[in-house]
Amino acid sequence: MDLKQKKRLIWQLPFLVLLIVGTILIIRQQQNMPYQKCSGPIFGTIYNITYQYDEDLQKELVEKMNEVDRALSMFNEKSVISKINKGEHNIPKSTEGDMFVEVYELAQKISVDTDGAFDITVAPLVNAWGFGFKNGDMPTEEQVDSMLQFIGYEKVSYFTERGGRGINKRDPRVMLDCSAIAKGYGVDVVARLLREKGIKNYLVEIGGEISTSGISEKRLPWKIGVTKPSEDAAEGGGELQTIINVTDKCMATSGNYRNFYYKGGRRYAHTIDPKTGHPVQHNILSATVLANQCALADAYATSFMVMGLDGAKKILEKHPDLMAYLIYDDHGKTGVWYSPSMKDKILK
């Protein structure tokens, strides 16, 4: 080593030391930063949020979720979607209006991709079958056919003109219901806010739909259990089917074992096929989907319940960014199929 190189090394050493010391201090600061936790009611269910930060952000997080509620809740008479269902066409230029458009366009895209298995106009059929079972009076074939006239994602369209925007319906009886994607979207909105704050370690869960990043308070990857389909599971009990590493992913689960009816000794699924107007008769009991967006995971989990095992596999072949863990009825026994790319994420 010549004299010139030695001098250069001497000058570089202080910077290297500062870099190492700075890195150590940052790591220690991150390790010492507390994990905040908050929970409460939202969207007719419960939210649970854990994040590593030096401030309590619950007020901001709740306001974000309330914005989603004001955009997509059918139970909020003043929400954007409720006003559209009442006959209004225009979508306001507001945060809530932007949220509605974002979810509407994503829902329509998934409807096309799944050939209508996912459809945000199916609510009247869901209600008719649900109330029918509860009242002991299932809808007749004539009633189903009548409702099918105003069911179908292609019967609504989004327009922009003269600086405004809105929704057109081919039939005024068309009703929009984003409940099969709204919780997942709410999770995405909360996760987005946390990332904007520079938060790298978090878990956001709303009614079972989940988004995670980084590591947990125990300095371990985030692990989520998938419940084994059973009647106990429908009542909140039951054992776990598997445990999945969902770090830096979003996850949603849809399952007919959670909501079903018995009539005449026959079991009917809660999931309605938008094309036939009847409860699905496929053999999937539970569909767990992992994706980069929770809204996507939420919507595709519902779609797979409608499409069945073979249909779900075809969609997954087209979308390598999606992963699924499907539990199905294999002639009275429980069968499991999962995406090959999910193999390393299954911990049990």
Image (cartoon, rainbow, N blue to C red):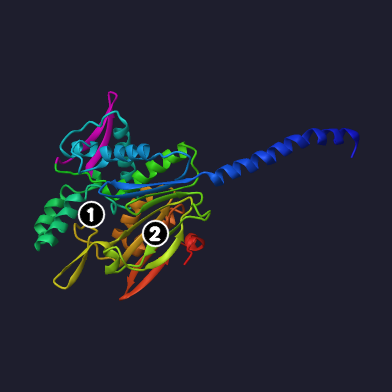
Which residue was labeled with disc 1? 274
Q: Secondary structure at mark 1?
A: loop
Image point (28%, 52%), residue name: 116
Q: What kind of residue is marked 2? A: Lys
Question: In the rendered image of this protein, does residue 60 appear above or below residue 185?
Answer: above
Q: Residue furthest right?
A: 2
Tell me the CA gap for discs 2 and 1.
19 Å
Q: How many marks?
A: 2
The secondary structure that dominates the magenta segment is strand
Image point (49%, 60%), residue name: 345
Front residue of 127/217: it is: 217
Question: In the rendered image of this protein, does residue 294 appear above or below residue 278?
Answer: above
Position of residue 293 measured from the top left corner of the image (x, y, whole percent): 41, 47
Residue 102 visible in the picture? no
Question: In the rendered image of this protein, does residue 212 appear above or below residue 342?
Answer: above
Q: Is residue 170 magenta?
A: yes
Which residue was labeled with disc 2? 314
Give the residues in magenta: 155-172
Q: What kind of residue is marked 1? A: Pro
- Place residue 62 in its image quadrant: top left
